[in-house]
Image (cartoon, grey):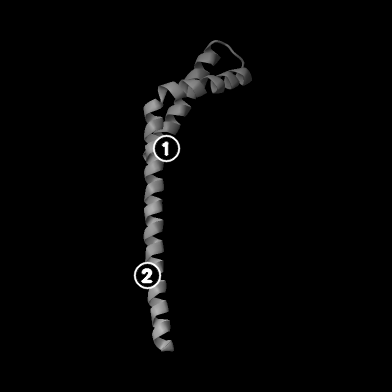
Amino acid sequence: MFKAVAVYTIGRIAIFAILLALLWAAELGSFPGILFALLLSMPAAYFLLGKQREDLAAAVIERREARVKLRERLRGASETASDAESDREQETQQ
């Protein structure tokens, strides 16, 4: 998952930096240049980083499924431990 996040983030930053450099080369002031670069980088990243965004979404889904499986496995282990404990309590009461 780390790789997918890193690739997408670096891509977004690179698109922003390129647009900022182009706007500064066009002699647009620093604050308006940053603002326009930020606004233009959003749709540009949407179209240019489609594959990376899909990879990131797949990594997030995969991690969530792994966490759900782990949680279910841990709950199953705790249920069997509590079942064994309740069995021991019943044996001592009899």
At 41% across and 26% down in the image, what residue appears? 49
Please determine whether, in this image, residue 84 is positioned above or below residue 68.
Answer: below
Which quadrant does the N terminus fall into? top left
Q: Amino acid at mark 2?
A: Thr
Position of residue 92 relative to residue 74, above or below, is below
Numbered tag placed on residue 5 in the rendering: 1
Q: Which mark is residue 43?
A: none
Res. 58 in view: yes
Percent position (x, y) of residue 69?
A: 37, 54
Q: Within 10 Å of the Cα at label 1, are there few (<14), some (14-19), or many (20+) other Cα atoms?
A: some
Q: Residue 53 lies in what quarter of the image? A: top left
Please state the horizontal and vertical placement of residue 10, each as a whole percent of the image: 43, 31
- Please identify the quadrant where the C terminus is shown: bottom left
**Is residue 47 found left or right of 23 in the rendered image?**
left
Tell me if I can see residue 1 in this picture.
no
Q: Quadrant of residue 7?
A: top left
- Secondary structure of residue under mark 1: helix
Residue at the far front in the pictured view: 94
User: Which residue is at a point 38% across and 30% down the rendered structure image?
Assistant: 52
Q: Which percent across, then down, holds residue 34?
A: 58, 22
- The numbered disc on residue 80 is 2
Residue appearing at x 42%, y 28% in the figure: 11
